[in-house]
Amino acid sequence: MMDLDYKTILWVITIALGIYGSYDYIRDTIKWVTKPHLYTWILFTIMDTIAFLIQLQDGAGPGAWGTLATGVMWWIIVVLALLKWEKNITKSDHLSFVFAILSVFLYVTIENPIYSLITVLCVLGFAMYPTFRKTFSKPSEETLSVYWIAGIRSYISIIATVNISILTIGLPIFIILINTTFITMVIVRKKQLINEKI
């Protein structure tokens, strides 16, 4: 019973963090301070929806709540990205999007858990590319709280994991690494651009 209560508390924390981080991002997008790249957020939302359906089918219980809450918030970001269309979409963005969609189809059809994990990591890597590219030249167009909160949520999910293996913690570790890299890049680029103006 204590074990269930402990996990439930952790998942409630991840839900609250997910909503808080997404709220900041949504607020800044409405103000047009943040300019989400449509491709990145479509792919994030697709993967989150698939993850939620798999968790639901597998009886994840409270473990699926965080995925659902984040997925709903991300659908809102996708709608905002459609309304406030990012015009700077390059050929490499298109290629990244195509590879990510192909990876999604592979993920849905692959039955080997290790290959599925590798495919998910590929999807997320391809999904982040357009945002990395856009933000490198315009680092002020992203709200970082959604990324560092995603890293914190991933860390909490590792703590809450009962069976530690590459399959159970591979994805959260990847999310922590890619988000840390992204946040670092944004901070460094902001400083570089400030120094160039001086």
Image: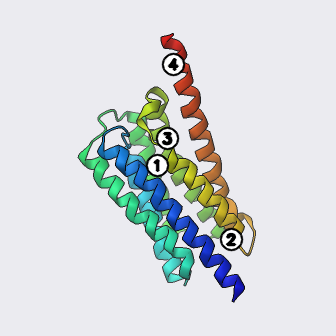
Label disc, if present, on residue 80 of the rendered structure: none
**Residue in the picture at 42% in, 64% down:** 71
Q: Residue 149, image x and y in percent? A: 56, 53
Q: Which residue is mark 2?
A: 160
Q: Residue 169, image x and y in percent? A: 69, 63
**Residue in the picture at 64% in, 69% down:** 113
Q: Is residue 10 above or below residue 192?
A: below
Label disc, if present, on residue 99 of the rendered structure: 1
Label disc, if present, on residue 129 of the rendered structure: 3
Q: Residues within 10 Å of mark 1 (few under 14, many from 20)?
A: some
Say which label, 4 or 3, has the lower sequence index.
3
**Left or right relative to 73: residue 66:** right
Q: Nearer the viewer, mark 4 or mark 3?
A: 4
Q: Nearer the viewer, mark 1 or mark 4?
A: 4
Q: Which residue is mark 4?
A: 194
Q: CA distance from mark 4 to mark 3?
A: 24 Å
Q: Amino acid at mark 4?
A: Ile
Q: CA distance from mark 1 to mark 2?
A: 32 Å
Say which label, 1 or 3, has the lower sequence index.
1
Q: Amino acid at mark 2?
A: Ala
